[in-house]
Image (cartoon, helix red, strand yellow):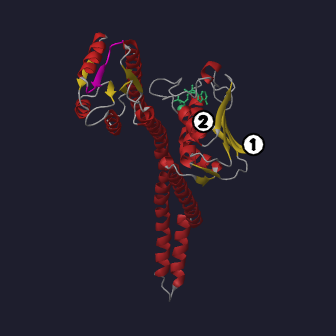
Amino acid sequence: MDWKPGNGEIMIVDDTPENLRLLEGMLRDKGYSVRPFPRGSLALKGAENCPPDLILLDIKMPGMDGYEVCSRLKLNEKLKEIPVIFISALNEPLDKLTAFTCGGVDYVTKPFQVEEVLARVETHIKLRQYQVEIERQNDRLRGTLEQLRSAQTKLVESEKMASLGILTAGIAHEINNPINFITSGISGLKKLLDQVLLLIERYTNLDTAHPKADLKKIDELKEEMDFDDVLNGIKELTASISTGASRAAEIVRSLRIFSRLDENDKKLADINENIDLTLTLLRNQYKDTISIDKQYGHIPQLLCSPGKLNQVFTNILVNAIEAIKSMPIPLTEERIAIKTGIVTEGDTELVEIEIRDSGPGIAKEIRDHIFEPFFTSKEVGKGTGLGLSISQGIVQSHQGTIDVESEPGMGATFRIRLPIKLGQGEP
Ligand SMILES: Nc1ncnc2c1ncn2[C@@H]1O[C@H](COP(=O)(O)OP(=O)(O)O)[C@@H](O)[C@H]1O
Ligand SMILES: [Mg+2]
């Protein structure tokens, strides 16, 4: 901040005209703008109309004395920060304690030592102006912080939408398959049932007096339609419809659990089950090209925000799938291995989730930056560079850690560790 001596506005309050003149002249000479007041009450009004940077205040005045003027200034929100320097004549006993307790910052004694008065005035004006500047900076910082917070919230939302976008595209496809199964199964079943109905009708209309001839016809018909095949067909189609229906139900169930992305409250959740349902929703992205190798250990349920952890699993799995698919020539059999289990660090027990892919791996220069927000090696429009930084934030809010181990050509392994007994922090 630029500060020049003589820069500032000072109010002088003194009932002795010579003192007013003396002080006024002295301060004006230094370049201050000065407003003199002969009475405390007038000074209060003046300050209210236009707050000065500093007030020089006589103590002994008729009507309202200096202490009272000062106390009233300090009660006023708008004026309470203005520094007040008391002026007292040497022959008046200066009550220093009262001067400070009613809010004065300093005092000078009459007759004035010009240099001393100027030095004190300068110091307090400077302090005041620094204080104002700091408050201004603080306000600006508060504003910037607010803007950053809301920008961050928007980014987290957009990343969430991006991963939901990837998921929904796949899910639409996934859910269509079992529905096609069911639809074509039902039309085949209808044809077979029509034949069975025809037989039942013949049996119902059997001539009970002379059934032989009718029964022969029915047998002929059975042979014609290959009755055993019809029965087997019915069994097969029913099984296939039932598979389709449970597959659709499974996807819907996964979606229902997964879509609790926004729920912040902690719940007991089975991590293995949550990884499975994330895999169900992502199946369309990997099913034809990548095999998934699961080695789930026995792990206790964790008190956590499952929706948020699912977002972490999604981000890491989508990265792994994209990494594998980005390889022009596959290096090995394309696979993602997921391992869960319990590890101990000191006397803390943690659940460890390891996701390893057979992709191209990550070079050191890139590896050092992957958890930074906006860091992406993907082309514009493909990557946001937010997946891992958001995931790290989520894991840390569960008092956990996430790290990566990777060499080019060796695939990448992401490792998440979550304490089994979560502390007091809010996940
Ligand atoms: N499994 C992986 N294999 C290779 N590189 C990866 C893998 N996971 C992440 N990365 C690297 O980390 C970067 C940051 O990932 P992320 O934060 O999810 O953002 P984005 O996927 O949008 O690029 C990726 O662009 C990629 O370079
Ligand atoms: Mg990503």
The residue lying toward the viewer, choosing from 272 and 216, is 272
The image position of residue 86, as x and y in percent, is 37, 27
Residue farthest top in this picture = 29
The image position of residue 334, as x and y in percent, is 65, 33
Question: Which residue sits at x=59%, y=37%?
Answer: 317
Q: Amino acid at mark 2?
A: Thr
**Disc 1 target residue:** 343
Q: Range of the magenta residues? A: 3-15
Whether residue 3 can be seen here:
no
Question: Which residue sits at x=71%, y=50%?
Answer: 299
Magenta-colored stretch includes residue 220: no
Q: Secondary structure at mark 2?
A: loop
Q: Amino acid at mark 1?
A: Val
Dominant SS in magenta: loop
Question: Which residue sits at x=56%, y=52%?
Answer: 266
The residue lying toward the viewer, choosing from 180 and 55, is 55
The image position of residue 274, as x and y in percent, is 60, 49
Label 2 crowd bin: few (<14), some (14–19), many (20+), radius 10 Å:
some
Taking the image in four quarters, ligand 2 sits in the one at top right
The residue lying toward the viewer, choosing from 345 and 85, is 85
The dot on residue 161 is none
The dot on residue 289 is 2
Question: Which residue sits at x=28%, y=16%?
Answer: 22
The image position of residue 288, as x and y in percent, is 58, 38
